[in-house]
């Protein structure tokens, strides 16, 4: 048998990433579109199929699998339940993956994994208290307090995207609530924010390319919104303004609750636009917090932060996770 290997899995609403790793590095990886049809085990089956196809010769050396997944989670059963970002009532992960691969599998929320990954492999290695926030299709968070990863009773301690940043808002979040941080700053929701603003102020955005696209029924993405913002589009500017204010309010709330030394921000939507988002978000956060200001910075792990988080979970699962999921291992 060769050197111990680990499989790290990062399940997102649009893409799933799988990596073959040693104890500290990504050695190889594969990326594919997250399945949106099938049943509760389709995603697990796709992960196993890709793993066997890509790394058949390494299977005997695999020590454990760490999975960083979109939530919400049922922690003990290692499954996703009623996620607003994929069309499945539930997504079974722990049982089918451990059974089909014959190794220990640990499943956590993707942002929780991100926090653990930053603690072990990123900027958080030398701090005891950190907050990791992902701003991508959705908004999520993970927290390390006094070197302990917080999980919560079902692994959903940090669904901070559902912090209410405007209690009087009629902007609906994908979860069904109103005024949530994710409603304003989830990448998948930005076209909805633009349409919401346009409907509230139909005469305000004359000359807006974004407004014309929406009126014409042309599909718009978060990439379009930020591209048009950079071109000076007035509607896109208001969407980004709401994004900044909501993100600052959500971050300030989380900082006031957890008192971190370090705040690390990841997620494709933010990282691809950090040049226009980071400074105004930090400026507003500093006005709203009551604790000593933490350092706020983008992740240094880039798009791989979820994979490094999954790797950290596989290599060093926290005691609470071992207690919740350790007995669910199925020897193949």
Image (cartoon, rainbow, N blue to C red):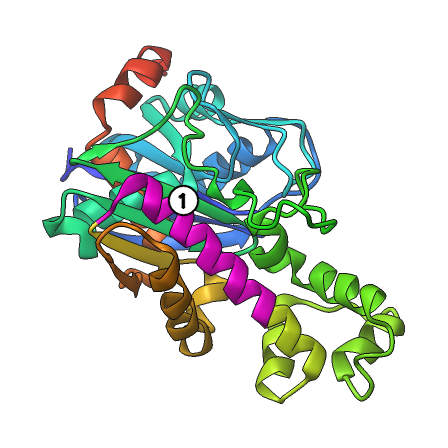
Q: List the single residue furthest toward the right.
A: 216
> Is the magenta region chiefly helix, strand or loop?
helix
34 vs 31, left or right, is right
Image coords of residue 20 (percent x, y): 30, 46
Residue 315 is left or right of residue 255, and the answer is left
Residue 114 at least partly seen: no
Q: Which residue is mark 1?
A: 141
Q: Residue at x 27, y 35 (%)?
A: 313
The correct choice, above or below, for 96 with respect to 194 in the image is above
Residue 104 lies, with reference to residue 35, above or below; the image says above
**21 falls in the magenta region:** no
User: In the image shown, does 27 or 58 lie closer to the viewer?
Assistant: 27
Residue span colored magenta: 241-260
Q: Nearer the viewer, residue 180 or 211?
A: 180
Task: Find residue 122 and report its image quarter.
Answer: bottom left
User: Residue at horizontal 63%, vertical 45%?
Assistant: 167
Q: Is residue 64 left or right of residue 10?
A: left
Quarter of the image with the N terminus in it: top left
Q: Quadrant of the C terminus?
A: top left
């Amino acid at each position: 048998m060769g050197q111990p290997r680990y499989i790290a899995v990062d399940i997102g609403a649009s893409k799933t990433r799988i990596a073959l790793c040693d104890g500290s590095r990504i050695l190889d990886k594969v990326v594919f579109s997250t399945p949106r049809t099938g049943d509760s085990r389709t995603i697990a089956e796709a992960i196993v199929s890709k793993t066997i196809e890509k790394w058949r010769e390494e299977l005997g050396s695999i020590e454990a699998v760490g999975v960083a997944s979109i939530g919400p989670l049922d922690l003990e059963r290692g499954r996703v339940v009623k996620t607003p970002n994929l069309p499945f009532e539930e997504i079974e992960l722990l049982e089918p993956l451990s059974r089909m691969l014959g190794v220990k599998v640990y499943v956590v929320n993707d942002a929780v994994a991100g926090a653990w990954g930053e603690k072990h492999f990123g900027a958080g290695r030398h701090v005891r208290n950190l907050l990791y926030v992902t701003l991508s299709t959705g908004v999520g968070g993970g927290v390390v307090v006094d070197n302990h990863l917080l999980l919560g009773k079902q692994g959903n301690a940090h669904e901070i995207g559902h912090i209410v940043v405007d209690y009087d808002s009629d902007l609906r979040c994908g979860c069904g609530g109103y005024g949530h941080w994710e409603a304003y700053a989830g990448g998948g929701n930005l076209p909805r924010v633009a349409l919401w603003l346009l409907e509230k102020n139909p005469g305000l955005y004359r000359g807006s390319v974004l407004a014309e696209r929406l009126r014409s029924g042309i599909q718009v993405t978060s990439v379009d919104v930020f591209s048009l913002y950079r071109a000076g589009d007035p509607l896109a500017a208001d969407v980004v303004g709401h994004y900044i204010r909501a993100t600052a309010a959500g971050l300030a709330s989380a900082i006031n609750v957890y008192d971190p030394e370090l705040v690390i921000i990841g997620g494709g939507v933010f990282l691809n636009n950090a040049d226009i988002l980071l400074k105004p978000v930090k400026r507003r956060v500093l006005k709203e917090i009551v604790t000593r200001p933490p350092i706020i910075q983008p992740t240094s792990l880039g798009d791989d932060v979820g994979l490094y988080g999954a790797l950290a979970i596989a290599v060093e699962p926290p005691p609470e996770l071992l207690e919740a999921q350790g007995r669910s291992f199925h020897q193949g």
